[in-house]
Amino acid sequence: MVVLVLSEVAATELNLEESFTTHAGIAHTRWATHGVPAPRNSHPQTSGSGNDFLVVHNGVITNYEVLKETLVRHGFTFESETDTEVIPKLAKFVFDKANEEGDQTVAFNQVVLEVMRHLEGAYALIFKSRHYPNELIACKRGSPLLLGVKELNDDVCNGSAFHDAKFLSKNGNPKELFLSSDANAIIEHTKKVLVIEDGEVVHLKEGGVSILKFNNDKGRNGDSLSARPASVQRALSILEMEVEQINKGKYKHYMQKEIHEQPESLTTTMRGRLLRGGSCKAKTVLLGGLKDHLKTIRRSRRIVFIGCGTSYNAALAARPILEELSGVPVTMEIASDLLDRQGPIYREDTAVFVSQSGETADTLLALEYTLENGALCVGITNTVGSVIARNTHCGVHINAGCEIGVASTKAYTSQIVVMAMLALAIGGDTISKQERREAIIDGLFDLPNKIREVLKLDQEMKDLAKLLIAEQSLLVFGRGYNYATALEGALKVKEVALMHSEGILAGEMKHGPLALVDENLPIVVIATHDACFSYLRIISLC
């Protein structure tokens, strides 16, 4: 697929040497959700041949088919299969209609606010328009968005653009503004950022920045374009990361780098939290973000883990140890499924929200739902200042460092360790489990060295991958603690190798999966020396 896209791009007559004198540029790295990877589906998407409006979009528009049908009826034609294309065309429709009805040109922010009123789903958007040459607008709902601010010294300025008065800051130095869905893209330029909240609109105009609050209730009576949005005041925050963290170093891929960072990331996750020896005679766990809520959690009717994808699998891996040490029933919820069912959440529950980014759309909606039902909400994230970190009652930061690879690696293992420490903290007042807790703490201290030993098998894993590369399907079996590993391993094969793979609970093998097995189907059995080893050994011998 990548080769086909590159050949299609190469066939176009692009002048890669051409330079532009401009104050703004927008671009996007697309993870294809609607439409195949192809130039026609790439961003920015346009409103039409005149490029009246251009948009880049991170997220998913759930009602795009309805909007597309409406726009087609009004004479618009579509060239891509992506949901994003409805946004610039909707902006042009709003702009044209407003100018037909009034004598004055509608403001750019009014057009964007009206577009937001019609969009459903999760999105972070950036708009440019030829009708507003000195303006750029960004907005978000359910997807992360950051505004980075950088002031340049005179000795690093080049290009006439930075000498224009409108690009000078209060101290007379020129400035640059960066909008991104990920801090990793901003850190090489500046550490000063503004975290944009849901429903906020960032309006850049002639060097100035204003932030407006979108109110969906305004304008419902047909006068939306004349409604004045409220302005927002916000202080800048400082990113606590370094440029070196986003470099690949000696590795070919970010995912490979992050796999090999796990001994260090796990050490950082546990530092200052797992205590033994020294001034602390007992082996214990200290989670500062939870200390004021531990009694409430221990009294909970049940603990509900809520997450998506890898984060859900990490919670599933931690469930057995949490049930064992706490004695509190633990249930698992996929965030989207909880919302679809409107599953019961009670005031006596403790809900634990697991998300690497702290911005996962379905998990955020599940958090809102859970807060409305009065449960204690705990956040486990890897991003300081994320929505989940801010909106939960308490939580733990996993301290895994930035993770750039799409397929999670070090964040997954750090999530499991944090939830194991959560189990140790909740069960810390039970005398009968003291010996077991201390054994687990010793095991966690040894974990980084164990991972270093596993990483020495790098070449063996490459050789094994070569044996499986031509296969069409793969089954991964696990049981007990290893069931979550089977699910996560199968997910990695899907995401990275693009091969069909299924993680299967070994105890259910004879209830369906066995019918798929023949002499040609490769099977991976994850079997560690625990209580389930004998069952899994039987499968491996079949």
Image: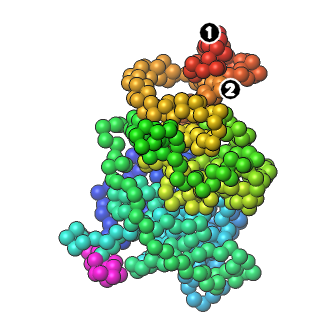
Q: Secondary structure at mark 2?
A: strand
Where residue 522 appears, x then y in whole percent?
A: 58, 18
Q: Secondary structure at mark 1?
A: helix
Where residue 84 appears, x then y in whole percent?
A: 58, 58
Q: Which residue is mark 1?
A: 541
Depth order, front residue of 4/316:
316
Residue at 55% over, 41% down: 421
What segment is highlighted magenta in the picture?
159-173
Report the disc number at residue 505.
2
The image's colour scheme reads: rainbow
Tell me the quadrant of the picture where the C terminus can be found: top right
Q: Does the stretch in magenta take in 520?
A: no
Q: How many marks?
A: 2
In the figure, 510 relative to 435: above or below?
above
Depth order, front residue of 55/12:
55
Report the disc number at residue 461.
none
Residue at 67% over, 68% down: 118
Asked whether, in this view, residue 355 is left or right of residue 365, the answer is left
Depth order, front residue of 345/79:
345
Where residue 283 appears, x then y in whole percent?
A: 50, 37
Depth order, front residue of 520/321:
321
Asked whether, in this view, residue 420 is left or right of residue 305, the answer is left
Res 114 visible: yes
Q: Residues within 10 Å of mark 1 (few under 14, many from 20)?
A: few
Residues at marks 2 and 1, CA–CA distance in whole angstroms: 17 Å
Residue at 46% over, 52% down: 29
Q: Does the stretch in magenta take in 163?
A: yes
Residue type, mark 2 in image: Leu
Residue type, mark 1 in image: Leu
Residue at 60% over, 64% down: 141
Which comes before the other along the chain, label 2 or label 1?
2
Res 83 visible: no
